[in-house]
Each structure stands twice: as structure tokens, then as C-alpha cells.
Image (cartoon, rainbow, N blue to C red):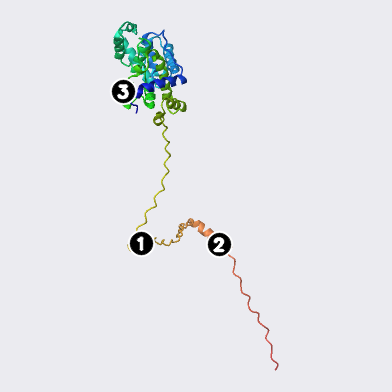
Amino acid sequence: MANHPNRAALLTKAHKVLKKHYKPVHPVAERPLMEQLLFALCLENATYEAAEQAYASLEASYFDWNEVRVTTVKELSESMSSLPDPAAAATNLRRVLQAVFESNYSFEIEALRKQNLGQAVAKLTGFAGASHFAVAYVTQSGLAGHSVPVDRGALWALQIVGALTDGEMEAGTVPGMERAIPKNKGIEFGSLLHQLGADLIASPYSTNVHNVLIEISAEAKNRLPKRQPKKKPEEAAPAPPPPPAPAKTPVAAAKAAPEKPAPVSAPKAVAKKKEPVKEAPKEAPADKHKAAKSAKKSAVPPKKKPSPVSKPMQRKPR
């Protein structure tokens, strides 16, 4: 990565290059220290436009900062949806409001302007939820101190161009920055660097962002974020052929041989049941005699055979 003797030269060159691509944004001087601290929490890792939109949404959606303090992170995140990480910003903002309220029983911290710069910075750092970026922003814009605010995006950009080592990036510090950048250029440089970092977080693979980084340092080309190749769906492997059937022994073959179907016998005719013969009703005795007489009358007499006709006898002549 970067070697320390070249860090000041890289920061100076970065300032010149950034002025060609971005315009500096100055803080709102009318905002009291408490509001500058809350705005810094919205601005961290976000563009100025998104931060102003989130801050305006908080002012319009809630009666005062105490109502914001007692609101859930989920509801605050909905009001701060313009930020890249609304939940993280809402969590820090709510923690800062709680810490200030427990310290002062109000949301007024203007008394820090009258304190020594070191004491004021220590007080700000002691508030739970106040990040290094937010403390540096308030120190620079509200307390007239020389502290360039750097967030995750700015640290990432400086690492890519070779101005930071991996360990310094993890620590979140840029040693020697305040010596390389004069105080009268601190607000301008901090604003320009922040815009580059916000664009890098929003579009890490943007060609325009990469060109700016390469313009600062040609070695940045080897450290630019690259898209991961999409994994092709694995083609389904062909099913393995079934294992060969084991050889059958004679006994097994005989058992496996298909049995001959048994002859199908014709269905037997179902014998009809004989209906019982009904006996004629017995007649009374008087009726029997009548029936016998009627039977005799109705009986046809048998035909008589014709008797043979006798021929006349012929007499023989004497």
C-alpha cells in the first residue's frame, strides 16, 4: 500500500483533482451546535442532498427533539429513508439525543463554544452515538477547529489511491492529514473528499468514480472494486447408468421364470331350481260324480272297423 513519505503528496494532488470534479459545500453557519451534530449524523456516508432531505424530514415530522428521542428507531428510519443506511443513522441520532438529555436535561450544548477546544472535543466524544466523523464535522464547522471529517467512504477512497494502509483504514484515522492540508483549506477539502466517498459508496463500480481515483493515483487501478462474476447455474450431471444385473443361478432363474397361467375353466351353468309342482286342489265327493259324467259325455266313441263284404258264392256247373 502507500508509504508514509508520499501521503502528503497524494493528499495535495487529491485536493487539486477533486476541485475539477466537485464543488465545495459549506456548512450552514446559522445552525446551533446541537443541530450541527445531528446533521453530521445524517451526512455520514451520504450525499449532501440526501442528508438535507433526511434532516428536513425530521424537523417536519416531529414536534421537537425530545419527541425524536422517544421515537423508535424503526419510525425514525422511515423518516430518514433517503440515507444509504437509515437504521444506523437513526440509532446514532437517538443515542446522541439521549446522552445529551441525560447530561444537560435539555438539548442545548452551546456552552461548548466557550470552553477550550480540547475540552469541547472531549465532551462531544463522550456522547454515546457521536461518531468520529460527527465530532470532526462539529469541530470544524462549529468550534473553528482544524479537523477534517472522514467517514467510511472517504477512508475507502484514500485507501484505493494508496494514501492509507489497511490498518489505518480499520482504525478510521488519517495520520498527518491536518499537516498536509492547511486549516484555511480544511472545510473545502473535507467537503470535496466527502462527495467522492459518498459517490463511491453509492456506486462503487461507476466508471466516473474510477476515473477520478485513477487520476489521483495511477496505482489505484489495481485496487478498484470489481464486480464479482455471476455464477453460472450448474448443469445437471447425467444420471449414472444403472449397475448390471447380477447373474442368476439355475434355481433363481427357475424361480424367476414366469409361471404358465392355469387353464381357465368355463364357468359352470347355474342349474335352475326346479319349481315345486303345484298339486291340483282336491275336489269334493259330489263334484267327482259330476266330473265323471261330463267326461263320459264328452268322450268320443271309437270308430268301428268296417266289416268285410262277403262275395256271392258262384256255383259250379254240374
Helix, strand or loop at label 2? It is helix
Instruction: Using the image, tell me which numbered label, if any, was put on residue 253.
Output: 1
Disc 1 to disc 2: CB gap under 8 Å: no
Disc 2 to disc 3: CB gap under 8 Å: no
Mark 2 Cα-neighbour bin, 10 Å: few <14, some 14–19, many ≥20: few
Mark 1 Cα-neighbour bin, 10 Å: few <14, some 14–19, many ≥20: few
| Residue 8 in the image: above or below residue 249 | above
Amino acid type, residue under disc 3 in the picture: Ala
The image quadrant that residue 177 belongs to is top left
Q: Residue under label 3, please give it.
A: 171
Left or right of 138: which side holds 20? Answer: right
Helix, strand or loop at label 1? It is helix
Q: Residue furthest right?
A: 317
Q: Residue under label 2, please give it.
A: 295
Q: The N terminus is located in which quarter?
A: top left
- What is the count of numbered marks? 3
The image quadrant that residue 249 belongs to is bottom left
* Residue 150 point in image, percent of width and height: 37, 19
> In the depicted view, which residue is nearer to us: 237 or 166?
166
* Residue 74 point in image, percent of width and height: 38, 19
Closest to the camera, between mark 1 and mark 3, is 3
Q: The C terminus is located in which quarter?
A: bottom right
* Residue 18 point in image, percent of width and height: 44, 20
| Sequence-wise first label, 1 or 2 | 1
Amino acid type, residue under disc 1 in the picture: Ala
Left or right of 206: which side holds 249? Answer: left
